[in-house]
Image (spheres, helix red, strand yellow):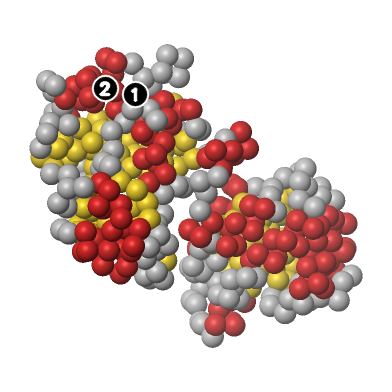
Amino acid sequence: MNIHEYQTKDLLKRYGVPVPPGQVVHTDVQATSVAEEIGGARWVVKAQIHSGGRGKAGGVRVGNSVSEVGVIADEMIGSRLVTQQTGAEGRLVHRVLVEQASTIVREFYLGLVIDRATRRITLIASSEGGVEIEEVAQHTPERIIKEVIDPAVGLLDFQCRKVANKIGLKGALLPQAVKIMKGVYRCMRDHDAVMAEINPLVITDSGQLLALDAKMTFDDNALYRRPEISELRDFDEEDPKEVEATAHGLNYIALDGDVGCIVNGAGLAMATMDAIALHGGRPANFLDVGGGATPKKVANAFHIVLQDPAVKTILINIFAGINRCDWIATGIIQAMRDQNIKMPIIVRLAGTNVEEGRAILNTSKFPFIIAGNLDDAAAKAVAEANKIAGKVVPLRKEQA
């Protein structure tokens, strides 16, 4: 789960991380009022959406007067901001953050992530702040400093000093850097975050380190014990289908293809999407119904997948262990009947009660396309989607 920049900064402030004075607003009138309250001669107005690259897209602008802050806020609020991460449709801006502008001397990158290889939180820092860390990793990887944190003792002062020195933070800046690094680590640890990022961390003209922009992402599986974090969730920033799927206990991610996928198990779901791509198709979604899918859960999965108007066919790939193929088949029949589904449905069943499941499908009145294995299922799903779209896709060499 992602949260907005202003929410991240509110959390970090509780752990002693310095951030610019500012406040989130929903109208231009509120924006001018906040600018007056903050004081100064320049302010930054920042669109609050769940996306990076806002500055390049015009979502971060400087106002040189109180009235200009109001004009900028009025132009942003209610507009659609298109960044490299939002896609062509962009994101609707509901609110903006008005902050005191800072005079920047130098920029750095600071982040904490869970390293899957070491299974530990890892501190990442770079002297190249203000740009995407992926760009730094690609062009100047030697400027990325990493420090693995032992969960038994946490982030230690000597580790912070070592990282700070390597990115060029010395002298009076050193104790500030240690305090910020340890504060971000404690904030991440205490709230079950999977990522915390300050980009840029800046030195101001007054010699102060300041978190100019911040972002945090949280583990969805831990939200049940973090109600204060759950309350920060902004459903306007999420795909409505993904929100509905979560309510039904389904794992769903919308993609841009035309082959809908209903699969049990995350690994099998990814393999299914790879198989679709291998046959020249594009999956419309990732959807994992989980290990104990009931007929109702399967019917709910159909309802969510069918909300995507791009879907031309649905591929159901079930390898039943805890699941039972007859349950899945019953759910498929229920969905076909209740939702009046007309598009081609390709079904591959394997595992527990597979013969019973196939019998239920074969004796129904619906013209299911039965597949014997994953490759066969993917090939048939792509062929049906292409047929509806009027496409002709050449066979792969091993199929010719």
Q: Quadrant of residue 380?
A: bottom right
Instruction: Count neighbours of disc 2 (C-alpha within 10 A) and say few if under 14, some if 14 to 19, many if 20 or more.
Output: many
Task: Determine crowd level at label 1: few under 14, some 14-19, many 20+ residues with C-alpha closer than 10 A.
Answer: many
Residue 218 to residue 49: above or below? above
Q: Name the residue under label 2.
A: 178
Q: Do the residues labelled 1 and 2 touch (CB within 8 Å)?
A: yes
**Quarter assignment of residue 349:** bottom right
Callout 1: SS: helix
- The answer to whether residue 162 shows anywhere in this view is no
- Residue at (24% x, 30% y) in the render: 145
Question: 9 or 106, which is in the foreground?
Answer: 9
Res. 237 in view: yes
Q: Which amino acid does label 2 sit on?
A: Val
Q: Which residue is drawn at 27% across and 14% down?
A: 158
Rounded to the nearest angstrom, the CA distance separating label 1 from label 2 is 6 Å
Badge 2 element:
helix
Disc 1 marks which amino acid? Answer: Lys
Task: Give the total of numbered labels.
Answer: 2
Residue 269: x percent and y percent?
A: 60, 53
What residue is disc 1 on? 182
Tell me where residue 189 appears, x and y as whole percent: 46, 28
Tell whether 142 sits left or right of 147: left
